[in-house]
Image (tube, rainbow, N blue to C red):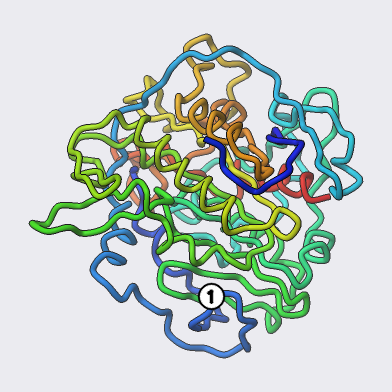
Amino acid sequence: MQSYNKTKTKHAFRDSSEDQSILQPLKSPHIQTHSSSHAMPKATMSKPTRPKTFLDMLIFFFSLITVGSAQWMEEMNDEVDIIQSRSGQGSYMRGLRCDLSDGEWVHDRSYPLYRAGCPYISSGLNCRRNGRPDSDYEKWRWRPHGCSMPRFNALDFLERLRRKRLMMVGDSIARNQWESLVCLVEGVIPSDRKVMSYNGTSMAFHALDFEASIEFDWAPLLVELEQGPNTDRILRLDSIERNAKNWRGVDILVFDSAHWWTHSGKWSSWDLYMEDGRLVRDMNPMVAYEKGLTTWAKWVSLNLNPTETRIIFRSASARHNRDNGWQCYNQKEPLQYLGSNARRIPVQTRVLKDVLNRMSFPVYLQEITAMSSLRRDGHPSAYAEPVYDSDPGSHASDCTHWCLPGVPDSWNEMLYALLL
């Protein structure tokens, strides 16, 4: 995890398989809809708000399409990212010089930190309920080299979040992490003091006694994707406000945008790019990614105040599908180390770092790619849906998302360490 741009003067920018169940509204005993995602709701019941426009429907359900095979992988130098705290940060992180992303998975029978029956887990991530016979994938703890990572304390986390909003923005992997965080905290809250609310493609878990919310906003590309004339889908590389309007007023923003940019061919989410009013059909996806991130960075610098909003950008989550030379079905323990090919970092991480380095707004890069690459045992594989027959291996495998409890819990323990 690395802090970029430690000395700031101005806030300017210088220069899937995506399972259907993961996108379905959660079935919670306390659900409410409301027009403003940050308003504190009352504990009442109503039906979730559905996407109101064709574009909302397109974006909301397009992730059901299988993740494409293009990886756009490239070698980059091994480097140790040092945590560099900014002023005003909590005591744990202040002055700490340790790379939380450099470590190992250790078996810990005191894990998981919450029950597998957490009601906020999407059906496609609830591997135990879907028939996965082993459970050791829940019992691995991430241990950084050279320092300790504090165990997640739900009450302490909620107290630090009192009267604040935390929002995770991105794709279904961001929702995967959001569900993990909700499950990490919900067990310490009385059932009548927690509420789920929905607003279009956004959703929020409210801890009423803490006046706090943990939210998710669906924006897999960050910039805008719209339906153009002649049914063409247009990715507007320099337009973001329709998505970004949801991010104003949030105290802690955790962004994720990586996987959708690597989709190609029939799995691509768009047909045309638009920039400066011009339509372009062909563009290197990583050039487009840099342009989209630049638009995001400019919006952040112009619209947010670093004394009021903290921003974390999580690196790409590992995928272990066959197109990458992996397979995840029937894997029951982490890899001990990564070979030279597996140590390759997605080129989008380099692009992301370049954009962050050009920003004057402080952004923390949460590096989880390498640690997740070791966990090919942590995916739903055949258990993204209920398995009733004797040959689970014949089912399609989800080697992109993560079982819960599981790997994203460690991402959130890293997030907790950052907020201490």
Q: Is residue 332 visible in the rendered structure shown here?
A: no
224 displayed left or right of 191 = left
Q: Is 41 situated above or below 69?
A: below
**Residue 81, quarter of picture:** top right
Amino acid beneath label 1 = Ser
- Residue 168 at x, y = what percent? 57, 56
Q: Residue at x 36, y 52 (%)?
A: 19
- How many numbered marks, from 0 up? 1
Of 126 and 20, nearer the camera is: 20
Q: Which residue is drawn at 64% across and 37% down?
A: 365
Q: Which residue is drawn at 81% across and 28% down?
A: 98
Q: Is 332 situated above or below 420?
A: above
Return the residue at label 1.
28
**Residue 240, quarter of picture:** bottom left
Q: Is 376 situated above or below 114?
A: above
Q: Is residue 141 visible in the rendered structure shown here?
A: yes
